Image: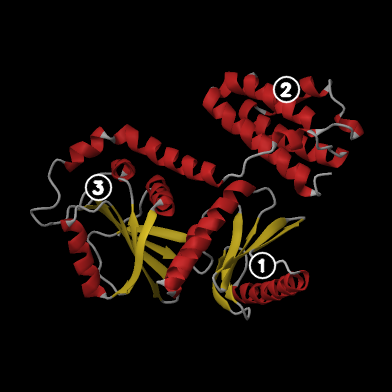
Amino acid sequence: MGEIPIEVVKTICSLCNSAKLESIKRVDASELGAEIENRQRQSFTGVLRLNFKEEGKLVSLYFLFLNGSIVLTMKEVVSSAGDSSFFTLPEPELRDGALEILIVEDGAMSRVAEKIPNKLAIEVEVDSSAATPEIPEEILKFKERIMADAEKAAERALEEFKPKLDMEKLRNTKLSAEKCRRVLSFIERELSEIFGEVKGKNLLKLRLTEMRFNEGEASCAEVAELINYLRKTALKNKLGKEEAEKVADRMMWRLANIAEGDGGR
Amino acid sequence: MQEILERILVDFLKISGVTAAGIIDMDGLTIASHSSRMNQEELEVAGGLIAQLVSAAREVSTVSGMGEVSDIISEMENGKFFILSADGVFFWFFTEPNINLGYIRVQAKKTVEKIKNSLSS
């Protein structure tokens, strides 16, 4: 067994977390073998993940399918502390356990397959009606598209869950000096990460001179204006519009979170 | 489906800022738990104490006529903890103080759905 590059592991874990769960069922080794064959015939794209306990540790076997072909089998061993080690398996290992069937979009799986180094990818004999030899070329073809697809899907899902900010209510909320400090500390940290510590602090100071933060008389409106100012200027110039929007939204959410933290006073 | 529940917790613990997670039944018995910072005994104790908290919240809810308890969230100096109801069991987790609250809640809701699915399958 060889170890798998951390980048590949992260991508696969992220893929499994965002995948749609088709079903969960308990299987024995022969049923797992049959399930794998079925999925090959059906040109399945997704992940079969078999979970079982071995010497008190949770072990998961991943079978990654792209259009019916297994592109990688991987073993995860979870320690009692929750840390995971990942290993490649040269061929599918058939075991008893609880099987999760995870559906993944073709594009997202192609992108993952592309990240798998050639030496780790496995060739599995499949039914003649299943996978075709052109698959590696297709993987290359979709290389750049796939990652973006998965990220967009994740962002859409996040957006759907996100409650909408009541900006009018937020702007009228008064901020105590303590809350001001917390908000500003968060904004400063974000800015420092983007611009470096010195410039990050200077950006904040430039605006703060016009405000009344230290007297505890500022309202969220002033902080919101500061964030929107940064959104349209420094952040946009440094990160581009799309990324600037994300950073500014994050600041706005933090502001709302802190403002409402003590009952919105 | 012990393995699946553990699998769900391990996946959840991969989220940045989550330090411990577990699933308890109504009596406070731990069904599954994982943490990189707490040992098994501490996790069992945490499960029992969390069940007491749920019980107290349910009493308050009954007295005030507010219906079933769905979530309990507590913020502390060095972290936060969350308890979410999941069809007869409770999913709980601890986080660091400066987590992305919105993202964690989205993931927690998804995790509750996974727990429900695995318990019903």
- On the image, the x and y values in percent for residue A152 come to 43, 38
Q: Position of residue A102 (x, y in %)?
A: 34, 57
Mark 3: few/some/many CA within 10 Å (<14, 14-19, 20+): few
User: Mark 1: which secondary structure?
Assistant: loop
Q: Residues within 10 Å of mark 2 (few under 14, many from 20)?
A: some
Q: Separation of disc 1 and disc 2 at Cα?
A: 45 Å
User: In the figure, residue B86 lies in which quadrant?
Assistant: bottom right
Question: Please, which residue is most extreme toward the left here?
Answer: A128
- The residue tagged with tag 2: helix, strand or loop? helix
Q: How dense is the environment of label 1, judged by Cα within 10 Å: few (below 14), some, or many (20 and up)? A: some
Chain letter of disc 2 in the image: A
Q: Is residue A201 visible?
A: no
Q: What residue did someone put label 3 on?
A: A119
Q: Are marks 1 and 3 on the same chain?
A: no
Q: Is residue A70 above or below residue A247?
A: below
Name the residue: 46% across, 43% down.
Answer: A154
Q: Chain of mark 1?
A: B
Q: Say whether marks 1 and 3 touch (CB < 8 Å).
A: no
Q: Residue at x 82, y 33 (%)?
A: A219
Spatial separation of the CA atoms under disc 2 and disc 3: 49 Å
Please report the residue visible at 25 percent of the width from the left and 69 percent of the height from the top. A32
Q: Which mark is residue B69?
A: 1
Q: Is residue B84 visible?
A: yes
x, y percent for residue A112:
33, 44
Element class at badge 3: loop
- State which tag comes first along the sequence, 2 or 3: 3
Q: Quadrant of the N terminus of chain A?
A: bottom left
**Nearer mark to the viewer, of 1 and 2:** 1
Q: Nearer the viewer, residue A245 or A195?
A: A245
| CA–CA distance in space, label 1 to label 3 | 52 Å
